[in-house]
Amino acid sequence: MAEARISTVKEIVEKSKYLVAISGSGMQRGCGHMSLRDQERAYDIEAEYGYSPEEMFSSAFYNTRTEPFYKFYKKEVLSQDMKPGPAYKTLARLEEKGVLKAIISREIYGLCAEAGCKNIIQPHGSVEKNHCPRCGREYSKQYLKDAKKVPICEKCMVPIRPGIRLYGEMIDNAVMTKVANEISKADVLLVLGVRLDQEFCENNLSYYTGDKLILITDRQEHGDENADYVIHGDLNELVPQLL
């Protein structure tokens, strides 16, 4: 692994036969996302609610303390108002040109879709796709935000289930199969703002058999050395140069 030039990576992308992108937290940061894992923010959340973000953003907390869960979820997660930046819009352009075949998006805010991307796989779900666990009726993010306390299904009168994967939950097997299939078909894998030593990457990058794993990220992390090409910097400046 060596620090690559954007011109080299652009040429690889242009010549690719089946380009797949994995979009992660670094892409969200470029849109103003405030992570629950940020140490200072985690401290503030624990001081306000009496629990750590990891405790509150879990399936166990949702199931046993639904009202405080939703108080936290609406204020700390659903209140984040982000718009897709140039990096996300570049993915949409690459897909429109027929270069990019699939986007595996690890964010839950629908930024890829809002940017215009079509073939998106969201392993962690979406804040927009909430449902009643009893009848399956779907509810929007706005419906959850507008609820005074716990959002309730209008038909079944039971709490609505957020459409995102909570800590402690497994990713749906069908979704993971789609992820593995797309990665296995890729001749070029474009990884954007993702730590390669995270469990998700370690479990899925083994399906990639090529030698053109490109990592563009805003932070230098352990695991970067597992990429074939690495560029560190602002994704909203670097990714648009791939066009």
Image (spheres, rainbow, N blue to C red):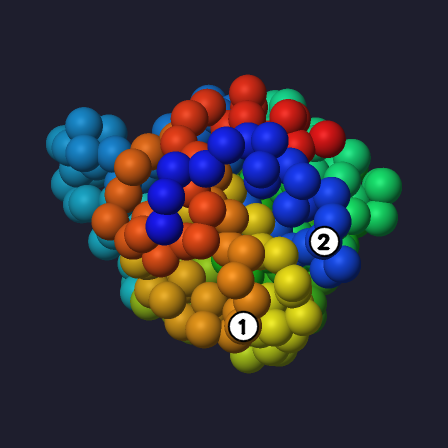
Location of residue 139 with respect to 78 vertically, above or below: below
In terms of image quadrants, where is residue 239? Answer: top right
Judging from the image, what secondary structure is the residue with disc 1 in?
loop
Q: Is residue 34 visible?
A: yes
> What is the three-letter code of the residue carrying label 2?
Ser
Q: Position of residue 219 (x, y in %)?
A: 33, 33
Q: Position of residue 55 (x, y in %)?
A: 23, 53
Q: Is residue 163 visible?
A: no
Q: Residue at x 56, y 67 (%)?
A: 210
Left or right of 22 on screen, residue 25 = left
> In terms of depth relative to the viewer, which is nearer, 5 or 91?
5
| Mark 2 burial class by Cα count in 10 Å: few <14, some 14-19, many 20+ | some
Q: Earlier in the sequence, mark 1 or mark 2?
A: 2
Judging from the image, what secondary structure is the residue with disc 2 in?
loop
In terms of image quadrants, where is residue 26? Answer: top left
Q: Residue at x 19, y 45 (%)?
A: 52
Location of residue 220 with respect to 186 vertically, above or below: above
Q: Position of residue 2 (x, y in %)?
A: 37, 43
In space, the residues marked 1 and 2 are separated at their CA atoms by: 14 Å
> What is the three-letter code of the residue carrying label 1?
Thr
Q: Residue at x 45, y 73 (%)?
A: 206
Q: Which residue is mark 2?
A: 16
Look at the image and tell me in which quarter the C terminus lies: top right
| Mark 1 burial class by Cα count in 10 Å: few <14, some 14-19, many 20+ | some
Left or right of 124 on screen, residue 39 = left
> In terms of depth relative to the viewer, which is nearer, 39 or 200?
200
Q: Which residue is mark 1?
A: 209
